[in-house]
């Protein structure tokens, strides 16, 4: 199959690229905003036609959660308008759209893991635009797989793990929120399940939404402590409340996603979050030694 990956320079796109590098089954095409503007309908149609795209993995998104509060039109354009365009073009080309969404479509007021069919009720501009993107894909009727994920990190790009380790190099102690619960996701694990599902499904009709994060539940505080401990750094982590660290955008207090559906669908287990964190930090440390 001819597979297009948008947003290829981000965390997820980079990990998909690593998998594709050793894949001789498909023809992969990787683009980012400098080579293909996913908000440009004419450019998208031309690209799909020139490369005979059969699968599009959309990793591009406006992910600056706080900035989205000040730039709602831009967030809507990238997080909803662009997926709608991709969905329409995929439908016209009988292609599969794989789209990545977020736990922020929920309000975070629950106390048990959110299932795919639970009512979405976002409380931030970012969450609202991502939900709008999901809905516009569904309404379009193209073949699609939507993955909702959370707390994404990797050895590349900007993310929570790299920020914590960088702070630990320069500070004796750091304060981290301890009253928000969720589950980290190593971008490689998400990339691997996406590629697995594409290989399994091929071009057969599909209209599905799946939740995927690593397994287990933690807080940002415990996530930070684990990162610093695994990396062997000497920095104290202090727990603070959300009220003590106000942000422009409201964050969900509880955003654990139920992974029962993807486990049953693929008959595969999901790595525990700390086990994947160990692998990521090992990769970070090996890169630092080069």
Image: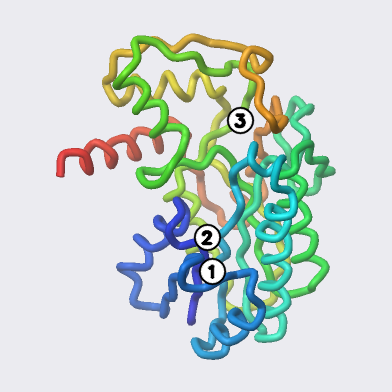
Of pointers 2 and 3, the one earlier in the residue sequence: 3
Q: Residue at x 84, y 43 (%)?
A: 119
What residue is shown at x 75% (from left), y 25% (from top)? 111
Picture quadrant of residue 78? bottom right
Left or right: residue 147 versus residue 72 is left
Seen as rendered, the residue at the extreme front is 70
The quadrant of the rendering that contains the C terminus is top left
Tell how many labels.
3
Label 1, label 2: how far apart the Cα atoms are: 6 Å
Instruction: Give the mark nearer the N terminus: 1 vs 3.
Output: 3
Say above or below: 25 vs 260: below
What residue is disc 2 on?
A: 194
**Colour convention:** rainbow
Q: Secondary structure at mark 3?
A: strand
**180 left or right, relative to 226:** right
Q: Which mark is residue 182?
A: 3
Residue drawn 68% across the image and 52% down it:
75
Dot 1: few (<14), some (14–19), or many (≥20) neighbours within 10 Å? some
Q: Residues within 10 Å of mark 2 (few under 14, many from 20)?
A: many
Say which residue appears at 42% left-offset and 50% top-offset: 188
Which of the two marks, 1 or 3, is nearer to us in this view?
3
Q: Secondary structure at mark 1?
A: helix
Tag 1 residue: 198
Q: Are marks 1 and 2 in contact (CB under 8 Å)?
A: yes
Q: Please say if 168 is above or below 85.
A: above
Residue 69 placement (x, y as % from top left): 72, 40
Return the residue found at the far left: 290
Whole-percent x, y for residue 258 in the image: 67, 40
User: In the image shown, does 1 or 227 lie closer to the viewer?
Assistant: 227
Label 2: which secondary element = helix
Measure the alpha-carbon separation of dots 1 and 3: 27 Å
């Amino acid at each position: 199959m001819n597979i297009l990956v948008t947003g290829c320079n981000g965390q997820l796109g980079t990990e998909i690229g690593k998998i594709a590098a050793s894949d001789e089954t498909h023809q992969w095409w990787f683009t980012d905003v400098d080579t293909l503007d996913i908000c440009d309908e004419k450019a998208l149609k031309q690209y799909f036609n020139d490369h005979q795209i059969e699968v599009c993995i959309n990793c591009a998104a406006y992910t600056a959660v706080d900035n989205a509060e000040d730039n709602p039109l831009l967030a809507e354009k990238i997080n909803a308008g662009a997926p709608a365009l991709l969905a329409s073009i995929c439908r016209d080309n009988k292609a599969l759209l794989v789209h990545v969404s977020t736990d922020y479509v929920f309000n975070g007021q629950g106390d048990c893991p959110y299932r795919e069919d639970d009512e979405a009720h976002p409380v931030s501009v970012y969450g609202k635009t991502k939900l709008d993107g999901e809905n516009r894909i569904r309404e379009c009727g193209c073949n699609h797989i939507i993955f909702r994920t959370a707390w994404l990190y990797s050895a590349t790009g900007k993310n929570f793990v790299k920020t914590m380790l960088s702070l630990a190099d320069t500070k004796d102690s750091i304060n981290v929120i301890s009253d928000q619960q969720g589950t980290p996701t190593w971008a490689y694990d998400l990339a691997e399940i996406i590629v697995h599902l594409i290989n399994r499904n091929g071009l057969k009709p599909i209209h599905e939404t799946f939740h995927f994060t690593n397994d287990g539940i933690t807080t940002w505080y415990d996530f930070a402590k684990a990162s610093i401990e695994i990396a062997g750094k000497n920095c104290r982590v202090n727990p603070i409340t959300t009220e003590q660290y106000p942000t422009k955008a409201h964050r969900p207090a509880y955003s654990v996603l139920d992974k029962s559906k993807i486990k049953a669908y693929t008959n595969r287990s999901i790595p525990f979050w700390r086990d994947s964190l160990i692998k990521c930090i090992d990769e970070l440390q090996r890169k630092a030694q080069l």
